[in-house]
Amino acid sequence: MPEIELPSIRGGSRTLSSFLEGKKGAVVVFWSETCSHCIRYDSFLNGFSARYSDLGMVAVASRQGENLDQICVTADRRNLSFPILYDSGGTVAAQWFTQQTPRVFLIDPLKRLLYRGAIDNFKYPEDPEYQGYLEPAIEAFLAGKQIERSETASFGCAIQSVYYILPKPLA
């Protein structure tokens, strides 16, 4: 995966490599502060580093129409503790062929792609039909085993849409 360097909502800028330093890999989540699908994963993302201390994790806010100030206010209001980088214009999302949020990427220390897609099947863990996708990939990777499912379809909110940039409503 290509190197990225983006401004952090907490100030300064960070590279993808900085999240890999001293880690066995990293998870990159393309994320939106307004996407209801992303909101559902707030606690999962807040607790990620405690559950997977061997992995770096970063969210990349790329959604068209969301600005840095708005994202900062949302992060404070929802007590988001995970790192968030701001991808103004969605350039990185386009480089990573990402069209919706949330979409996750699990990479190794050399930035090789191991898994991409959805976090789960958008059911709650207590639901009998729940199926996790990201966590089984992480567990296999950390155990040195083959990842059985390296890609799943993503679902969620569009990063860019013609409807976000219409100058006026269509008649």
Image: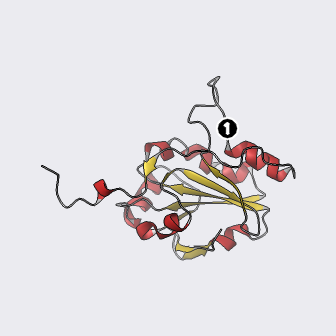
Tell me the residue at 39%/58% (across/down).
160
Tell me the residue at 53%/77% (across/down).
12
| Residue 75 x %, y % | 47, 56
Amino acid type, callout 1:
Gly
Toward which corner of the image does residue 165 lie, by quadrant? bottom left
In the foreground, 106 or 54: 106
| Residue 78 x %, y % | 47, 49
What SS does tag 1 mark? loop
Q: Residues within 10 Å of mark 1 (few under 14, many from 20)?
A: some
Tell me the residue at 34%/60% (across/down).
65
The residue carrying mark 1 is 132
Q: Is 17 located above or below residue 63 in the figure?
A: below
Toward which corner of the image does residue 57 lie, by quadrant? bottom right
Tell me the residue at 68%/67% (across/down).
19
**In the displayed image of the protein, which residue is found farthest to the left?**
171
**In the displayed image of the protein, which residue is found farthest to the top?**
128
| Residue 82 x %, y % | 59, 57
Identify the image quadrant of the N terminus. bottom right
| Residue 14 x %, y % | 59, 74
Q: How is the image coloured?
A: secondary structure
Side of 9 where 81 appears, left or right: right
Q: Is 66 located above or below residue 13 in the figure?
A: above
Side of 121 where 99 appears, left or right: left
Marks counted in the figure total: 1
Side of 21 where 101 appears, left or right: left
